Image (tube, grey):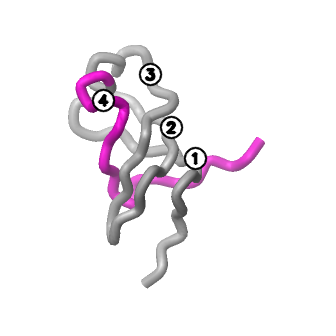
Amino acid sequence: MENEFRVGEKVKCKKFGTLSHDFVGEIEKVYENSAMVAILEHDAADAVAVNDFHNRVIVRLKDMKKVSAK
C-alpha cells in the first residue's frame, strides 16, 4: 500500500505525549505507518518538550496532514 506522504513535505501533526499543542514540521523519513518529522513551528509552551526531542519526532501517518502551499 502506497502512502501519500513524501520526504520534504510540510505537514501539520496532532499533539501527543508531552506536547500540548499541534505543530508543523517537515518529513525527513517515511516508514510503513509513521514518519520522522523535523519540528519547524510549535507553540511556545512546548519549547522544552521540543528541545528534549531534539526537534524531531516520529508521528503516525494518520495523525498528520499536508500543509497546503501558500
| Residue 24 marker | 2
The amino acid beneath tag 4 is His
Image location (x, y in percent) of residue 69: 73, 47
Indicate which disc, 2 or 1, sits on the residue closer to the N terminus.
1
Q: Measure the alpha-carbon separation of dots 1 and 4.
A: 18 Å
| Residue 54 marker | 4
Whether the residues at callouts 3 and 2 have beta carbons within 8 Å, the answer is no
Label 3 sits on a secondary structure element that is loop
The residue identified by callout 1 is 10
Whether the residues at callouts 2 and 4 have beta carbons within 8 Å, the answer is no
Indicate which disc, 3 or 4, sits on the residue closer to the N terminus.
3
The amino acid beneath tag 3 is Asp
The amino acid beneath tag 1 is Lys
Q: Measure the alpha-carbon separation of dots 3 and 4.
A: 15 Å
User: In front of the other: label 3 or label 4?
Assistant: 4
| Residue 49 marker | none
* Mark 1 surroundings: few (<14), some (14-19) or many (≥20) residues within 10 A: many
Label 1 sits on a secondary structure element that is strand
Indicate which disc, 3 or 2, sits on the residue closer to the N terminus.
2
The residue identified by callout 3 is 43
Instruction: Locate residue 30 relative to residue 16 in the image: left or right.
Output: right
Residue 61 falls within the magenta-colored stretch: yes
Asked if 54 appears above or below 1 in the picture, the reply is above
Image location (x, y in percent) of residue 46: 34, 21
